[in-house]
Amino acid sequence: MSITKQVSIFIAEDHLISRMGLKMLLQQTGTFTVVGEAEDGESAVQQILELKPEVVMMDLEMPKMGGVEATAILKKQLPEAKVLVFTSIDDDASIFAALKAGADGYCLKTISGEMLAIAIQSVLSGAAWLDPGIANKVLRAQASPQVEDKPNLSDSKLKLLKLIEESKSIDEIAAEFNVTDALAKGLLSELLLQLRGRSDEIDSSTANKIQLGTSIRPGDTVVGHYRIDEKIDEGGMGCVYRATHVLLDRRVAIKTLHEYAVSGELDRERFRTEAKAMAALIHPNLVTIFDYGLLNDTVPYLVMEYIDGKSLANLLISGEHLSTESIISIFAQVCDALQAVHNSGIVHRDLKPSNIMLIKRDDDSYTVKLVDFGIAKILTGSSVQLTGTGETIGTPLFMSPEQCKGAAVNHRSDLYSLGCTMYTAFTGTPPFVGSSAVETYMMHVSRAPEIEPLKACRVPRKIISLVLSLMEKSPEKRPASATEVRQALLKA
């Protein structure tokens, strides 16, 4: 006989009858256990901090301390607890105040027992939850000129609110958007962050893990014989330094990665295996890796060829015009590099304009160097994790649908990213740009790329067909290999 895990609930409600009715409603499910209750806000906060329940049912109007203030205190001191507002108050000001205080959901006391169970399970799973009546209120507030300081909600967020208003479940919402449950939950959580007025919030546990090796300074000598000359880049994956091998007088680039990438022995072994495989790749269109290891046994580093050039991303940003012939030449070389990577059993996982380095030749053409191949696998293994804010490890503008969904990827995932990158090179704009990372993921999963921008840039018909074939949602419908793409490019 299976045993269902009991979810611990705390009730903060000043009306005895309401408190008894809610307690009875919860315990009838057989899933929820009420571990404490309080009739005023101060007492509620004290008990909750001691008992640490999984879910707090929070009324808004209580003696001594209101529910909004209590919620703000709890979310600061006990962020892991889920706070679900349970109230009869449905005015716009109260709704937004509670959400801004950090409430994970907001429901009215008219809610049915079945919907209440759904609400609790929803916030426990990391998704936001709004009462259908509250969704209606938010939609009305969005349309009202009298409501100030409203979040700027995109069309997809407004559609999401409409679906919530219609009492759609997570499964039904996912089906409406043609995405996975994980992406639907991510969109819900993102909506709640916007309603709270904290759309730029990131997962604090992730932020605390990010250490970029900022203790390395120009003039330092690392790994025995590399003198740091300057920091040339810093981003989400780590730092890049220009350095000199003091014995060989050779200029190199050193990339340090997050310490948490190799936090255990299995991670360290995986890093060594992947870095060794990458270092064995020798190709004129791949950056050469000379050395790898762990600084102070904690910070992963790679020593690689220093490239005196600019990225395709910087070239596009600068507004420099690239002819169709130049773009074809650049991507034919990218295909050669990708094929070498794929032949070695490595999937790049992060192909994008900023990872395509260009070295200008005397005849104004370019030599391509593909960088950061395999780095994403070193950092994440074989899966992509969705964080609390709906973000994934990777670059949303160029990620394949299977990457966006956290599914297994193969070399055809790189080909999809190649299609997105080619689209960007021709038009100057990525094919899918949502108002947030999650919305961009959803567009990759469910929306076809617009053809008109390609036509407007007078991209040859055969290349348009090639780009669209690379961006097929199903990996099996994409070209079979990078070599096949190269051949198609040169015939266009």
Image: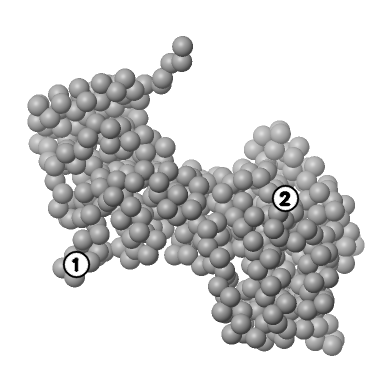
Disc ID at residue 222: none
**Res 321 → quadrant:** bottom right
Q: How many labels does the image show?
A: 2
Which residue corresponds to the image point at 25% horizontal and 25% vertical from the top-left? 26
Q: Is residue 82 visible?
A: no
Q: Name the residue under label 2.
A: 410
The answer to whether residue 347 is above or below residue 124 is below
**Res 88 → quadrant:** top left
Whole-percent x, y for residue 409 in the image: 68, 49
Which residue corresponds to the image point at 77% horizontal and 65% vertical from the top-left? 370
Q: What element carries label 2?
A: loop
**Res 21 → quadrant:** top left
Q: What element carries label 1?
A: loop
Neighbor class of circle 2 (other Cα within 10 Å; few <14, some 14-19, many 20+) is some
Q: Which of 290 and 120 is in front in this view?
A: 120
Whole-percent x, y for residue 398 in the image: 61, 63
